Amino acid sequence: MTTTGSTRKTGTGATATDALAPDTLVPGPLALARHRLGVPQRAGALTMVPITGPAYEGIVPPRSGLKLSQVAGYGRVELRNGATDGVAIVPLHIGYIQDAAQNHALCRSAFLAPGAALMFEDACCVQESQGGYLTGRDQWFFVLPAELRARALELRGVEGYSKLWDDIGRLNRRYGLPQRGHLEQVLSRRRAVLTQYRSRLELQPGQLGALFFVGDRFAGLELAPDPVYFAELWMALVCFAYGPAAWHAERTAQPPTAATTGGPASNPASGPSQGQAAGEGVPAGFDAGDLAGLRAALERDRAARIDEVAGWIAAIPAAGARLQEEERYLGLRLSTVTGGEVAGQIVTDGDRPVYASLFARTIA
C-alpha cells in the first residue's frame, strides 16, 4: 500500500510517507498493494487514515440497496437485496434502530443475490426491554461499537436474542451509564456528540476505506468495494463503530479541550486545529517570524504527524491471524479472520480484496 499526496524528506533521506506502506495487514489474500493511504486526519482521540484504490463494480451499497424487511420475533432479522442487479455484501455487525420492533444487530456478514432475502436467525437484540423505542423519523442503521465487535463475531451462528446483553451492560457501565443491555443508551442518548465525528473527519474524493486509531492504538480497518458503498457506511462507522471509544477516551483524558467537545478536526495537511492542546499531541502554536517560517513549521509538523501515524500502522498486531472461509457467491469468498489481537471478516475475489471489516479485539 502506498500513500497519496506529497511526501516530506526525513532526516534519514526517506520520505515521511514512505513508512505508511504496509502491503498486507493479515496473511493470505488481503493484499492492499494497489491501494493508497491518504493524509491522516485527527478529531480528538480518533484518527482516520483514508484509503483509496480501484473500485470493484457490481456490489449493491448498504443503504440504498439493502433493506430491513422484517423482524420476525426476538433474534430473527430478515434483510432483502432490493436491487435487480448486483450482489449485496451485508456489512459486518450492521444493526437497525427502528420503530415498533426491538432493535437488533447482526453478528456476521453475508451475501444476498439480486432480489433475494435472508433471515438471520443468529441476530442479537440490543435492547433489553420494551423501553427506548424511537419514532419512525429516527430510524437509522449503525455498526456495533468497536468494544462489542469481537464478542459479537464469536457469537455468529449462535441463536439467542439476549446473548449480547451482558456485554452491552458492561460497556454502559464503563461509559458511566446504567448497567443494562440497552445499546441505545450510547447510540441514541449520545447521538448528538457521536455524530460530530461525521463532520470533523472528512471523506476524501474516491475514498473507499479507512484505518481508525483511538489514541495511538489500532481500532479498525474498513474497506468497501467502491466509494459509494463506503460513503453510505461512513456515518455508521465513524459515529457509532469507532466514535464511542474515542468519545470515552476524550472524556477520561485530562484536561478536556475544544477538540474533545466538538471542535474541528486536525488534518496534518493543514496544521493543527484551533482548540487542540499540546497535551493531545498538537502544538498550541508555531514560533515563526514570517509567512515563510510559518509554512516551514507547518511542513515539519505535518511530517512529524505522518511519521507518528506510520509508527502506529507498523505496530498493527496482525501476526498469526487465521482465515476461515464461510461462504461463496460466484467468484467471491467471505472469510472470517481470527487472530490474537485482530479479528473480523473479509470478502475477496481471487487475490483481490473487495470488502474488509477488521478490528482490534481489545479497545483501550
Image (spheres, rainbow, N blue to C red):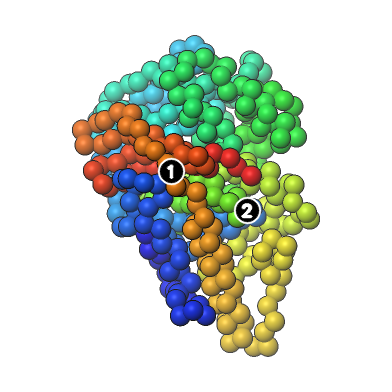
Mark nearest the camera among 1 and 2 is: 1
Task: Name the amino acid, label 2.
Answer: Gly
Tell me what residue is drawn at x 57 percent, y 23 percent.
Answer: 164
Is residue 359 depicted above or below 17 in this figure?
A: above
Residue named by callout 2: 215
Q: Name the image quarter holding the N terminus.
A: bottom left
Taking the image as shown, residue 308 lies to the left or right of residue 333, namely right
Q: Name the image quarter holding the C terminus.
A: top right
**Which element carries disc 1, helix, strand or loop?**
loop
Could you say where residue 232 lies in the image, as x and y percent from the top left?
43, 42
Is residue 107 depicted above or below 224 in this figure?
A: above
Taking the image as shown, residue 275 lies to the left or right of residue 73, namely right
Residue named by callout 1: 320
Could you say where residue 101 lies in the image, as x and y percent from the top left?
54, 17
Q: Quadrant of residue 59?
A: top left
Could you say where residue 269 lies in the image, as x and y percent from the top left?
52, 69
Mark sitting earlier along the chain (1/2): 2
Taking the image as shown, residue 43 lies to the left or right of residue 343, namely right
Q: Nearer the viewer, residue 250 or 263?
A: 250
Q: How many marks?
A: 2
Binning the other alpha carbons within 10 Å of mark 1 as few (below 14), some (14 to 19) or many (20 upward) gives few
Tell me what residue is drawn at x 68 percent, y 70 percent.
Answer: 283
Task: Name the amino acid, label 1.
Answer: Gly
| Farthest-out residue, right | 255
Tell me what residue is drawn at x 43 percent, y 20 percent.
Answer: 157
Q: Nearer the viewer, residue 256 or 300?
A: 300
Could you say where residue 351 lies in the image, as x and y percent from the top left?
26, 47
Taking the image as shown, residue 180 lies to the left or right of residue 111, namely right
Report, in whole angstroms, how far the alpha carbon at label 1 lies from the one at label 2.
24 Å
Q: Nearer the viewer, residue 332 or 322?
A: 322
Residue 134 visible somewhere in the drawing: yes
